[in-house]
Amino acid sequence: MNDPDQLAELLYGDYSEADPREALRAMATAAAMKDPRSGALFVTGYDLVRELLTHPGLTSSTLRDPLAGTGLSEEQIALHRPVRDFVALWPVFSSGDYHQDLRSRIRPALDRANVTALVKELEKDCRGLLHGLLAAGGECDWAAAFCRPYSLALLARLFGTSTARMADLAEATDGLMAYLAKPRSYTDDGLAREANASLDRARAGVRAYVLDGGQGELAGILRDMAEDPRLGHDVAVAVTAQIVTGTLDPLAAVLTEVVMRGGGPAEAVAGSEGRAEFTEEVLRISCPFRFAPRYAVQDMEIAGHRVEAGQRVMLILAAANLDATAFPEPLDWRPGAREGLQLAFGAGSHYCVGAPLARGATEALCRVLAADGIRVDHDPATFRRAAPMGADRVLGLRVRIH
């Protein structure tokens, strides 16, 4: 694919019904291409994405005011500014000492011992949910009846609070995520108002449910952040919001892929090695974090494209995972047969600190399905996803659990 207009068509298409993986595979046939609409360089080839994930010439923090040059009035800028400034505090959009400080603080709560203990308890939650759905007849919407409560149970254990409180906090972030998911969201004042209201609710929810009421190790770490004069309350809220939003939809996408690939049958996930291979192929082919935004810190050249300092460079992790040069016949389902390392969690200093927990939660579902002899049959005609390419958000899938 060498046509920039074709790239734009793929990037901004409606994927509520079409399979985005076909488009992502097509994007990966070119190592990099400039988007004619945004001017950003989109990098899709596996080798180049893997290299640039750790390249010192790229940073996760924007070097320019994202609202400058947009043509917005002063009143509009004042409306959008709080949301943009808040999102800039998220670890995923930060860099340098600030980013490393946040990661070093969070990491102990997600070390091997803590994750192992949490997943052990999460397996009980998983079994309880599945058997509860079986007792209710087994017919349900997978996303609403299993994925969301399972993800909320994970978050509740992580923060040391109740699933009801996590459900309320998750709801509070909906407006923020809608703003982030929409391309050129600075053009939508109504969405900005909703995002600001969502931000106010998230601040109150984090204060009540995590900083004041949370009992887990992570809640204590966030309290220390909030009380640190170098960081403060908004940083603690930003970190919490990223963890919550980075769990709900991405984990739902992975859990849905599990059942769409046979429900984790015993023959496919026999033993820990089989479960790990199954999980890695799920992550490769579903890749819930599709884009990793970066910014050039200096003028540079990438795959023959001139990139100026401050210019946006989008590393398309999901396309790299479907690059046929790294994964022959990339849309084929081949657990354990792939030699390349999938990039769903990124690499380097921005490698997702929650990756072990995401893998653990996925393997816990596989273990329960295999151990209890439970199968989940799905109706492909009922599968619904959000339209934008940028995020994999499952909206519904009818299943029969038996």
Image (spheres, rainbow, N blue to C red):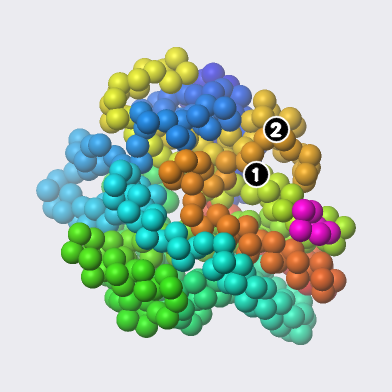
Q: Are marks 2 and 1 in contact (CB under 8 Å)?
A: yes
Direction top: furthest residue? 304
x and y percent of residue 194 in the render?
31, 63
Q: Is residue 197 visible?
A: no
In the image, what residue occupies the spot 58% across and 34% down?
Answer: 320
Name the foreground residue: 254 vs 10.
Answer: 254
Quarter placement of the N terminus: top right
Report which quarter residue 385 is drawn in.
bottom right
Hey, what amino acid is under mark 2? Phe
Secondary element type, mark 2 = loop
Residue 317 lies left or right of residue 187; in this view the side is: right
Residue name at image x 46 percent, y 81 percent: 161
Q: Nearer the viewer, residue 87 or 27?
A: 87
Image coordinates of residue 372 in percent, x first then y, are: 82, 74
The residue carrying mark 2 is 327
Q: Secondary structure at mark 1?
A: helix
Rendering coords of residue 256 (x, y %)? 67, 59
Q: Is residue 7 above or below residue 165?
A: above
Magenta-tinted stretch: 269-274
